């Protein structure tokens, strides 16, 4: 890690003036929680983490730990770190980054072991956790990449949810009619672009507030797909809803790579959309930070007037990016109906478009960062469903909150300050 | 390359910003465009650079008519521009900024910044710029950022360089360096259009001067034209460039700032251990390049900052830790540096703006109800007293010109009996006629026995008003020197030399370094 320190060490008086006790207090409360819950209320049995599936070529032994033992260890470490944070705040006014980071990791491990030790089966398949997470992660990644494309160019994209939903609906309908999954995929991209056309038209040409346009578009797409779903997709011919029978995109395992424990089943046994996602994340990162196109896009998002004065067409760049974003999110929407489940249902995106927005911010407007954030949200979401099935001591409804609680923490800047492109949301008007 | 503008007219609605302007810039000359703020200089240059489309008229490059539909066309024709507000992306490196729009790429549009870096080093070496291509622009001092802008133009082979108010953000030394660079460029065959309202600089650097007033060309003048004559052309009437002001008769030291430190949330010291005091009946001017802690100093007094250490006392009362309302009530008048954002509420009427800090008190309000009649009467009085040129006191404040807006702010702040008057950038963007008036009012406030603190980045203004001058650099006080100190001394201090070291350096050079001695360049500003 590269550390760029100011040459002067902060003086004691400065620390007194700007000292913030928020972090040590938070850590202290969490440490107390660890003592009470992990130790005093800790389950006595063991927790088993299964790493391999039975079908895997290489079998990795299961990880078995004592729930109580881990609970005690976690509580001790948490207390020590909270004390350290308090001392650092008192002496220097700041706490070192590694303290908060280590605390988070240790606490999460403790929480996992406690929850799993408390379930009736007392074991969990890590592979299942991650492969299941991809069902949530994939659309979030596409959604957040749509956000990266338009927000890097300076247009706020709240309409990701609508783009995903439009993609999901169109993919199901077109694929049902044509019988071809690829036709559905293509149509989904077109549907996403159509939503983007409206976003671009109103926010760039007519300079309407971009947040309002985005929200309205989400409502519009939700209403429209809901209406068409009732009127078209529910139509039965010979007792079958023929307009809601999309073709399925099969998983294509990649030889050798798919046999790596955990990573193989998660990343290399995917459908074509999943592989496209991996390529897109890397390509978009390279494009944004290494090519002429990316330099211009970023300039337009940071300082449109500067871009204009060197001959870059600001609004054309923005329109192109918003449209491209629509296509990406549309394909992400197709994942719902062509891969994840085999039919469309009303409002099936269930707010993942907004989580994608959070992943975008959490990932600091960087494609790779956004993808990792999406993975985190995916794992949290899937953990919740696995745990509620396994019969945890915590109520399932409460656990369902987990991804959203995480989102709030992420967006509120607990993990460092996220800086948006400087001109994000500002329309560019030439005199 | 020769540039000619013929009958350029640019109107925005009913407002005619440029009215049939003719201008010829010969190859290899420095042609100054002199005019007040709002005279239409920048509009004209934006027309020339393709940012605005002229309503009528034509542009000729080397006697051939050209038409620019955007900056790209202007650049292709060899015109480069250094904007008053730099057109640099702060989070990009120097190389990325220079490359933007004219990138060298290898296969598939992949950036080849090595090529751009090489070009930057070439130009940097040729003119002694000392610019690191890999530095982030936001980390660079403004003087260096300006050089990046010049490099941007030169990389694109500009033969005509437009510099829009380039010295506004520079220290006197940096200004001298810029003038050297302009000379070198001219000798290399580049034509330069230099836009400024500073007579001293225009006279020092130009080959030809064209004066613009209210969107029209008033005339041309050689650079040896006397300053008063140029000023009269610029303003349209004879102006008194020097303020008649008696020497201060300082009374008791009632305003004291002791070991004042102001930090931002990250703990960076924006103002670092500043100690100064001001007496009754004295003007202390705070000089320095924009962004060296002046804003924080004034805002800390008013109670606008969170992380403040040290003490600020007025008449023995501690001000640190008080609310803004309490500070105002203790008798502080405050003119913020940005009148449009912080000084006025643009949508409110002039009358309402005149009572923004008085409306809670009788007779402006009673029992929580505004006394509209009294507020209106107050407005009529103040508008007359401060010569605010408005149709009606009920007009919205943002319909006024900059000078008149500033008069409204000053009228409000001087309405109460004051124990301290602080004004930041009291005449920024204000026409010369209003400057005279505003300066007189500030001196009158001093003569009535109020301690006055003026913050200004314009050295001319500082020298005009100050009884003593405090110079800030990077949040630290470089020293407090007498009001008639030389520009050279102040320049060195503004560049970060403490007062005593700056004086030693000037003495070593045999220059006029002793305080009290007025340098030649100062006297140039006076009528001859």
Image: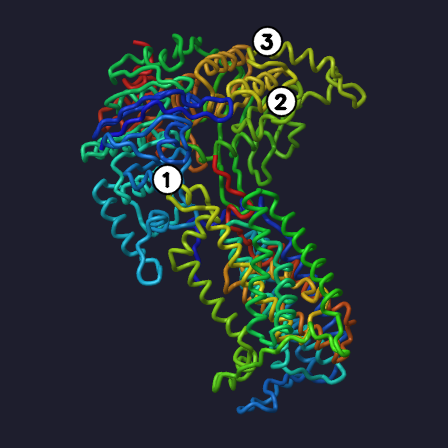
Q: Nearer the viewer, residue A361 or A305?
A: A305
> Is residue A261 shown above or below B25?
below
The quadrant in which the N terminus of chain A is found is: bottom left
Label 3 marks a residue whose chain is B
Residue B2: percent from the left, percent from the top?
23, 30
Q: What residue sits right under mark 2 in the picture?
A: B396
Label 1 Cα crowd, 10 Å radius (few <14 / some 14-19 / many 20+): many
| Horizontal side of residue B304 vs B22, given as left or right | right
Secondary structure beneath disc 3? helix
Left or right: B205 as drawn, with respect to B408: left
Q: Residue at x 43, y 18 (%)?
A: B466
Image vertical order of residue A249 relative to residue B454, above or below: below
Q: What whole-number distance in Å separates the C-alpha atoms at marks 1 and 2?
A: 35 Å
Q: Is residue A252 above or below residue A5?
A: below
Residue behind mark 3: B384
Q: Secondary structure at mark 1?
A: helix
Badge 2 density bin: few <14, some 14–19, many ≥20, Cα 10 Å: some
Tell me, for residue B71, which label it has, or none. 1
Total labels drawn: 3
Q: Chain of mark 2?
A: B
């Amino acid at each position: 890690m590269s550390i760029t320190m100011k040459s002067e060490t902060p003086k004691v008086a400065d620390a007194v003036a700007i000292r913030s006790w928020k972090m040590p207090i938070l850590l202290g409360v969490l440490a107390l929680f660890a003592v009470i819950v992990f130790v005093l209320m800790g389950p006595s049995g063991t927790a088993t983490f299964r790493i391999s599936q039975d079908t895997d070529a290489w079998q990795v032994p299961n990880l078995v730990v004592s729930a109580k033992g881990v609970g005690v260890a976690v509580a001790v470490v948490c207390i020590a770190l909270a004390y350290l944070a308090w001392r650092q705040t008192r002496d220097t006014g700041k706490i070192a980054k590694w303290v908060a980071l280590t605390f988070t990791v240790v606490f999460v491990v403790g929480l996992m072991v406690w929850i799993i030790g408390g379930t009736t089966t007392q074991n969990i398949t890590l592979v299942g956790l991650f492969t299941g997470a991809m069902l949530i992660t994939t659309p979030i990644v596409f959604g957040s990449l749509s956000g990266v494309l338009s927000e890097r160019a300076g247009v706020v994209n709240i309409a990701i949810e609508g783009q995903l939903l439009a993609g999901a609906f169109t993919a199901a309908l077109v694929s049902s009619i044509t019988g071809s999954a690829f036709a559905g995929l293509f149509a989904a991209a077109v549907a996403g672009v159509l939503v983007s056309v409206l976003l671009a038209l109103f926010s760039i040409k007519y300079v309407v507030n971009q947040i309002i346009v985005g929200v309205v578009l989400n409502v519009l797409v939700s209403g429209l797909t809901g209406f068409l779903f009732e009127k078209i997709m529910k139509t039965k011919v010979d007792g079958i809803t023929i307009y809601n029978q999309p073709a399925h995109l099969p998983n294509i395992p990649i030889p050798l790579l798919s046999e790596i424990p955990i990573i193989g089943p998660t990343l290399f046994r995917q459908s074509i959309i999943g592989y496209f996602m991996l390529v897109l994340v890397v390509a978009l990162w390279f494009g944004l930070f290494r090519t002429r196109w990316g330099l211009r896009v970023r300039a337009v998002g940071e300082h449109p007037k500067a871009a204009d004065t060197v001959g870059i067409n600001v609004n054309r760049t923005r329109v192109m990016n918003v449209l491209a974003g629509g296509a990406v999110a549309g394909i992400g929407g197709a994942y719902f109906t062509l891969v994840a489940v085999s039919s469309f249902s009303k409002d099936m995106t269930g707010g993942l478009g907004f989580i994608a927005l959070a992943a975008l911010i959490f990932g600091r407007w960087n494609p790779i960062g956004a993808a990792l954030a999406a993975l985190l949200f995916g794992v949290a979401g899937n953990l919740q469903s696995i745990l509620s099935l396994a019969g945890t001591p915590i109520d399932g409804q409460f656990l369902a909150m987990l991804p959203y609680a995480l989102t709030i923490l992420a967006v509120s800047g607990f993990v460092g300050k996220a800086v948006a492109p400087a001109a994000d949301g500002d329309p560019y008007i030439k005199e | 390359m020769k540039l000619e503008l013929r009958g350029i007219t640019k109107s925005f609605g009913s407002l005619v910003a440029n009215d049939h302007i003719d201008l010829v810039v010969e190859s290899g000359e420095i042609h100054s465009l002199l005019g007040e703020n709002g005279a239409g200089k920048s509009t004209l240059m934006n027309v020339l650079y393709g940012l605005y489309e002229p309503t009528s008229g034509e542009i000729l490059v080397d006697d051939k008519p050209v038409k620019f539909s955007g900056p790209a066309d202007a650049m292709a024709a060899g015109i480069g521009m250094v904007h008053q507000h730099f057109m640099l992306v702060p989070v990009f490196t120097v190389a990325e900024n220079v490359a933007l729009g004219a990138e060298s790429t290898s296969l598939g549009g992949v950036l080849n910044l090595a090529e751009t870096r090489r070009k930057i080093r070439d130009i940097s070496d040729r003119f002694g710029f000392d610019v690191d291509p890999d530095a982030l622009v936001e980390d660079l001092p403004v003087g260096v950022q300006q050089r990046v802008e010049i490099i941007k133009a030169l990389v694109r082979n500009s033969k005509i360089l437009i510099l829009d108010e380039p010295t506004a953000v520079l220290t006197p030394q940096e200004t001298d360096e810029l003038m050297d660079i302009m000379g070198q460029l001219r000798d290399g065959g580049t034509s330069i259009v230099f836009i400024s309202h500073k007579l001293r600089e225009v006279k020092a650097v130009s080959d030809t001067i064209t004066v613009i007033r209210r969107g029209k060309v008033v005339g041309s003048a050689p650079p040896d034209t006397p300053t008063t004559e140029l000023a009269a052309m610029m303003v349209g009437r004879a102006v008194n460039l020097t303020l008649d002001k008696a020497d201060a008769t300082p009374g008791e030291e009632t305003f004291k700032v002791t070991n004042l430190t102001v930090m931002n949330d990250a703990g960076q010291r924006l103002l670092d251990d500043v100690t100064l005091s001001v007496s009754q009946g004295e003007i202390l001017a705070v000089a320095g390049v924009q962004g060296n802690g002046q804003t924080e100093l004034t805002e800390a007094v008013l109670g606008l900052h969170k992380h403040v250490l040290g003490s600020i006392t007025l008449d023995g009362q501690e001000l640190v830790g008080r609310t803004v309302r309490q500070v105002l009530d203790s008798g502080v008048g405050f003119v913020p540096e940005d009148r449009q954002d912080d000084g006025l509420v643009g949508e409110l009427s002039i009358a309402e703006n005149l009572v923004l800090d008085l409306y809670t008190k009788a007779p402006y309000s009673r029992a929580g109800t505004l006394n509209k009649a009294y507020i209106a009467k107050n407005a009529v009085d103040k508008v007359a007293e401060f010569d605010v040129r408005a149709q009606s006191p009920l007009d919205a404040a943002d319909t006024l010109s900059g000078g008149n807006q500033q008069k409204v702010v000053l009228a409000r702040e001087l309405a109460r009996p004051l124990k301290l008057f602080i004004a930041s950038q009291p005449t920024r963007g204000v026409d010369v006629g209003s400057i005279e008036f505003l300066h007189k009012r500030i001196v009158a406030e001093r003569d009535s026995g109020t301690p006055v603190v003026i913050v200004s980045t314009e050295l001319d203004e500082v020298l005009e008003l100050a009884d003593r001058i405090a110079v800030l650099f990077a949040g630290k006080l470089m020293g407090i020197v007498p009001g008639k100190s030389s520009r050279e001394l102040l320049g060195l201090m503004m560049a970060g030399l403490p007062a005593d070291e700056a004086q030693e350096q000037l003495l070593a050079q045999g220059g006029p370094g002793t305080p009290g001695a007025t340098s030649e360049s100062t006297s140039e500003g006076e009528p001859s």
